[in-house]
Image (spheres, grey):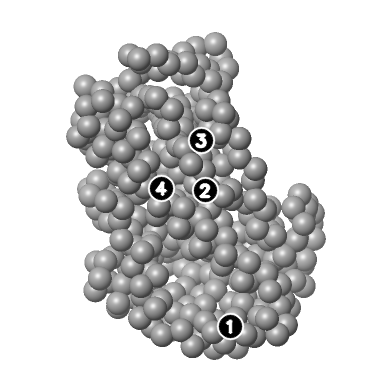
Amino acid sequence: MKKGIIVGGGIGGLTTAIALRKAGMDVIVCEQAPALREAGAGIWMAPNALQVLFELGIADNIIAAGKKLEKISVVDLKYRPISVIDGAWVRKNFYFDTVAIHRGVLQHLLAAQLPADTILLNKRFAGFRQDDRSVVALFEDGTSLEADFLIGADGIHSVVRRQMQIEQQLRYSGQTCWRFIADFSLPESEKDLMYEIWSDQKGLRVGYSHINDRQVYVYITDEALPGGKDQTETLRDDLLERCEAFPLLVRQMINAAHPESIIRSDLYDFPPIPRWTEGRVALLGDAAHATTPNLGQGACQAMEDALILSRKLHFVADIPTALTEYQKTRWKKAAYITNTSYQFARVTNTTGLLRRIITGMLRATPARVNEQQFEKIYTLSN
C-alpha cells in the first residue's frame, strides 16, 4: 500500500486525502492550524467539482448542504444582462448545477469523510528530504513523518514550493475583495439565481447568491492598492458608500452583514509555472496554480487535481513517474483557468469608452461561443 503525506488541510488537501484513500492508499493530512477552520465565506461548486465529488461518492452530501443555482448572470447596474450561464444547458451537458455553499460547511463535510487520526493539527511544515525510496516531512515541532510521496496543498504561499526552489513572483490583480455571509432572504424570483453586478467604475463589482435557505454570500471587488486595512467600526458604512450606485438590494445585504465577519483579501495569482513535481513531491491546488476567483474555479481546480493525482498514483507503479503524469494531465487546463481568470480581472479594471466597447462585445457574443468556453471549464481533465 502506498503511503502519502498531504501538507495542508484546506479543501484541496482534504479532497486529495479522500481520493487517495478511495484509491487504496494510506494518507496523513498535516495542518498547521489548531483546528480546521476554512478561511472565507461562501464558495460556488461548479459542475466540474461536483463531477469529482460524485466520483468520490460524496456529491449528494455537498448538494444537500448548499443551494442549487438555476442561472448565473453578469449584469449592469440596471440588471441588463452582459453574460449569462444557462443552467438548463449546463445540466443537460454536465449533469450538475452550480451549488453555492458555506466554505466552513464544505470543509466540515470533507473532513467527516476521513478517520479522525488521518488529520494532524498544529503540524507546521518546515521542509522535506527525499531519496530513491521515500520522502520525509519535517515539522517545526521537531517531529517528522516518512512516506512514499508528499503532496504540497499548502496554498499560494506554499512552503513546499519554496523548498522545490520554484521562486514565483505573485501577480496582483489590481483588485481587493470583501466577502461576507449575512442572514438575508432574497426576493422569491432570485432565490435560485446568482448575480454579479458590474458598476461603471474600475474593478467595482458585487456578486451574491443564497448558500442555503436563510443566508446569502456576498462579495464586493474594487480597484485598490494592495495592503489596505479596514476599521471595523466604519467598515459597513465604507462599503455602503462604495456601493451607493448599486441597487437597493445590495445595500440591504451590506446592512445585514456583521462588520467583524467581513473578510478583506487582496486578489493575487501567479503566472503558470512549468514544474509542479520533484521526485516524490508534487504541488496541488493554489500551491501549483493559484488563480484569481473571477471564474469561481480555485477550489474546483484543486478538486480536479485530487482526482487525477489519485488515478495516476493508483495506476502507475513508479511514484515519480505517476506525479509527472499528473502534472502532464492537469497543466494545460490549470494554466487556461489561471490566464483566463486574470484576463477577466483586467477587463473589469477598465472604465469609460473601453468598458462600453468590451461590455458591448460581451453582450454580442453568440451563446455557442460562451458555451464552448464553459465546455473547457466544466469538462474534467483526462
Helix, strand or loop for disc 3: loop
Contact between marks 4 and 3 (CB within 8 A): the answer is no
Residue for badge 1: 359
Q: Nearer the viewer, mark 3 or mark 1?
A: 1
Residue for badge 3: 154
Q: Is residue 360 visible?
A: yes
Say which label, 1 or 4, has the lower sequence index: 4
The image shows residue 284, relative to residue 366, as above or below, that is above
Displayed quadrant of residue 133: top left
Q: Position of residue 131 (x, y in %)?
A: 39, 14
Could you say which is closer to the camera, residue 76 or residue 343? 343
Say which label, 2 or 4, has the lower sequence index: 2
How far apart, in angstroms, are the residues tagged by discs 4 and 3?
18 Å
How far apart, in angstroms, are the residues tagged by discs 2 and 1?
28 Å
Q: Amino acid at mark 2?
A: Pro
Q: Amino acid at mark 4?
A: Trp
Q: Is residue 221 left or right of residue 155?
A: right
Q: Amino acid at mark 3?
A: Asp
Q: Position of residue 14 (x, y in %)?
A: 38, 38
